[in-house]
């Protein structure tokens, strides 16, 4: 443990007004202040990287939802990795690498029990991507435990060029399934098939998804891993096979108007085909985190799992990066390197 006499300046992104509709840079403001000294049991962390995740949007509403609401003038809640620069907590030393919810800022003073030490033999960003709660672990549990994709089955993934979808599809491939991804634009579709090894890709911007899906999977699909919701969910339900499974990971198409979510109209396909639809979050599998970390790490080290990163530089890029997440201007894991 150590003390500091001249503490660094913390640059933080705060919420100017609650968001209605599409998130835009003008909803935020960059402020500066001296980083706070850690009290007993606390540490001061220099943030290295911020994870840009869809859940952030749900915290920006003017009502409390699943995720903690960000107050006006408050730092936007995010998941991060960083290093301890000052410690007033037993078991944490200067230089230790940690991950946790540190917020959209360059320095964070937090209780030591709210972060987790990580192995810095891997790039720190790995713990936001392949080994991140909102990316690798979410994809793992959604595909392995909820979707339960098996060898020889056909799996469809929406939002497939994004962080979670790209990992979920690769996991299904590793388990022997045929994998089809849905993404927006020819470049993303090429990324899925040529870089990640998907068996097929559907460009939803190039026309109706249904005929494209029927061409790639004429006998239907066994598993649908859904990140998007809306009309694409209905298409998947219409093509679900007997005893098929739908894993509801998210519905990014609905987040701009969360109080008026449009649900599926073809849900009776579940009854007709003895299929099931199940929602989940990574927090429902806390007891299985060691299992996921071990398997994902093994795949990473063996070169069987690829996580492409889209990195924006500087804390000031946070608002635009968050907007880009929802407008489809990236591939893979969206990060801000502060």
Image (spheres, rainbow, N blue to C red):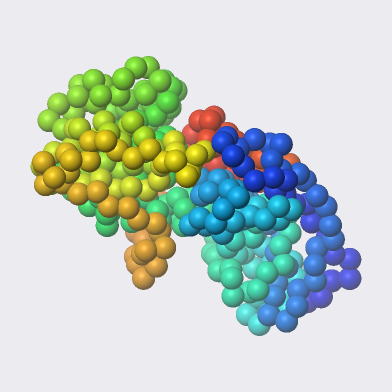
User: For the image shown, how many numbered marks are present on the structure?
Assistant: 0
Image position, residue 256 (x, y; %): 52, 38
Residue at the location (31% across, 20% down)?
208
In the displayed structure image, the side of residue 238 where residue 311 appears, left or right:
right
Quarter of the figure with residue 23: top right
Q: Viewer-proximal residue, 211 or 177?
A: 211
Q: Does the image show residue 100?
A: yes
Furthest residue to the top? 206
Quarter of the figure with residue 43: bottom right
Residue at the location (33% across, 31% down)?
231
Image position, residue 113 (x, y; %): 59, 75
76, above or below 292, in the image:
above
Image position, residue 151 (x, y; %): 17, 45
38, above or below 13, in the image:
below
Quarter in which the N terminus is drawn? bottom right
Quarter of the figure with residue 94: bottom right
Residue at the location (48% across, 44% down)?
258
In the displayed structure image, the side of residue 14 where residue 200 appears, left or right:
left
Image position, residue 3 (x, y; %): 81, 75
Q: Viewer-proximal residue, 290 or 325?
A: 325
Q: Viewer-proximal residue, 253 or 115?
A: 253
Q: Does the image show residue 79?
A: no
Residue at the location (47% across, 53% down)?
134
């Amino acid at each position: 443990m150590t003390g500091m006499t001249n503490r660094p300046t913390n640059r933080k992104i705060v919420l100017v007004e609650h968001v209605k509709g599409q998130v835009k840079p003008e909803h935020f403001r960059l402020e500066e202040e001296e980083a706070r000294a850690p009290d007993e049991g606390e540490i001061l962390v220099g943030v290295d990287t911020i994870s840009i995740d869809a859940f952030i949007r749900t915290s920006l509403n003017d009502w409390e939802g699943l995720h903690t609401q960000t107050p006006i003038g408050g730092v936007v809640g995010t998941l991060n990795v960083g290093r301890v620069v000052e410690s007033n907590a037993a078991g944490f030393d200067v230089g230790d690498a940690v991950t946790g919810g540190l917020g959209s800022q360059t320095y964070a003073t937090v209780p030591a029990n709210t972060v987790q030490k990580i192995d810095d033999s891997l790039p720190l960003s790995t713990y936001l991507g392949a080994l991140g709660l909102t990316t690798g672990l979410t994809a793992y549990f959604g595909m392995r435990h909820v979707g339960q994709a098996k060898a020889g089955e056909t799996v469809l993934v929406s939002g497939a060029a994004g962080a979670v979808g790209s990992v979920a599809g690769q996991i299904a491939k590793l388990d022997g399934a045929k994998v089809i991804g849905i993404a927006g634009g020819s470049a993303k579709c090429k990324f899925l098939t040529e870089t990640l090894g998907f068996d097929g890709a559907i460009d939803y911007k190039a026309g109706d998804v249904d005929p494209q899906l029927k061409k790639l999977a004429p006998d239907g699909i066994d598993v649908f891993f859904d990140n998007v919701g809306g009309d694409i969910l209905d298409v998947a339900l219409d093509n679900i096979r007997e005893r098929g499974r739908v894993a509801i990971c998210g519905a990014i198409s609905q987040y701009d108007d969360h109080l008026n979510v449009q649900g599926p109209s073809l849900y009776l396909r579940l009854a007709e085909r003895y299929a099931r639809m199940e929602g989940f979050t990574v927090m429902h599998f806390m007891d299985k985190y060691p299992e996921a970390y071990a398997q994902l790490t093994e795949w990473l080290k063996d070169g069987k799992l690829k996580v492409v990163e889209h990195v924006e530089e500087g804390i000031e890029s946070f608002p635009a990066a968050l907007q880009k997440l929802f407008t489809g201007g990236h591939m893979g894991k969206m990060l801000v390197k502060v």
